[in-house]
Image: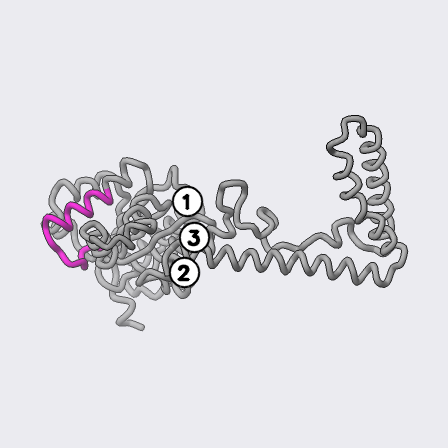
Amino acid sequence: MTDQALLSELLSALAARRAAAVQDAKDRKEAFAKENPEFRALLERERVYPEKLFSLLDKADAQEQIRKIKREYADLKAQEAKLLKQSHLAPDAFLPRYTCEKCSDTGYLGARMCSCLKTQYNRALAKKSGLGGLFEKQSFESFDPERIADPKARESMREILSDLKDYAAHFSPETAANLLLMGGTGVGKTHLSSAIGKAVLERGFEVLYDGAANLIGQMEAEHFSHDPTIKSERPRTERILNCELLIIDDLGTEFYSQNATQSFLFQLINTRLVEHRPTILSTNLKPKELEARYGERLTSRLFGEYAVYLFSGEDQRRNG
């Protein structure tokens, strides 16, 4: 499914939810009117007012009649409110109960996507990636630094966990730092980077999380593709470069072609740095291994512009 088709599917679900809320409100109102003849009579009178007003809108000398109709309508609504109060019902008792009060389940606030739709869309996009499933099972709450046997490594991981939780809780695309998570296999880099992604996504920001191998491979495939259907949708590369938070896991595991890989990775990292879009990278490679693989120009960007976190300790996956 393309990204646009996915968005359309989410909007259709929202539209159905909105229609259900409207119908539910109508049913509740009709049920009350059935039990309350006085209220039903007021509703019957209320239904004719829109037609009355519409018939007068194009008449230049009808202003006094329009004001009279509006006064009558206001009096009618006051009588309805009085009946609701007598029945111990709130004035908004028969308004639709939308899931999202901000956008009334339309998905948009004017031309801007509402956070409710944005969160659903970002979550669906995350699930499309090879690592999207991690969002469902890896969180800050499920990460336990107390399992680390070495006291120094355990204390270091407590500090890292605290810093990264704070990063996610206060994330803003305009001010968030770039992060480089370094350490051996199974020490928690993927767990905590996906926990950041999950927390930031739940706050309504656009998160793209993928493995380096898949992400770089897709950038290369898109760049060299001659398939017009790929060009017709929002390009994957555009989303990689422009998303509010990009998380790349396992840098160094991608298929390596020196010229192409270095070029695409430098374009990605440099573009996001210049445009102040935060990126989180995790890697098993040591500093010298990074420089040997990607060159001094790229690694100088990483160690000069990224906050580096060194993960230590034993492989927790081997320890169960």
Q: Badge 2: how crowded within 10 Å, few (<14), some, or many (20+)? A: some
Disc 2/disc 1 C-alpha distance (Å): 16 Å
Asked if the stretch drawn in magenta spans residue 172, the answer is: no
- Image check: 20 left or right of 281? right
Residue positioned 59% across, 59% down in the render: 17
Disc 3/disc 2 C-alpha distance (Å): 12 Å
- Image check: 260 left or right of 250? left
Q: Which residue is mark 2?
A: 139
Q: Quadrant of the C terminus?
A: bottom left
- Main SS category, magenta section: helix
Residue 273's disc number? none
Residue that sits furthest to the top in the current view = 61
Q: Secondary structure at mark 1?
A: loop
- Image check: 65 left or right of 239? right
| Residue type of the residue flagged with mark 2 | Ser
Image coordinates of residue 281 in percent, x first then y, are 27, 51
Residue 171's disc number? 1
First-in-chain label (1 vs 3): 1
| Residue type of the residue flagged with mark 3 | Leu
Q: How many marks?
A: 3
Residue positioned 81% across, 60% down in the render: 32
Q: Secondary structure at mark 2?
A: loop
Q: Which residues make up the magenta segment?
A: 251-269
Residue 201's disc number? 3
Give the quarter of the image for residue 156.
bottom left
| Camera-nearest label, 1 or 3 | 3
Task: State the residue in front, 89 or 252.
Answer: 89
| Residue type of the residue flagged with mark 1 | Phe
Disc 1/disc 3 C-alpha distance (Å): 10 Å
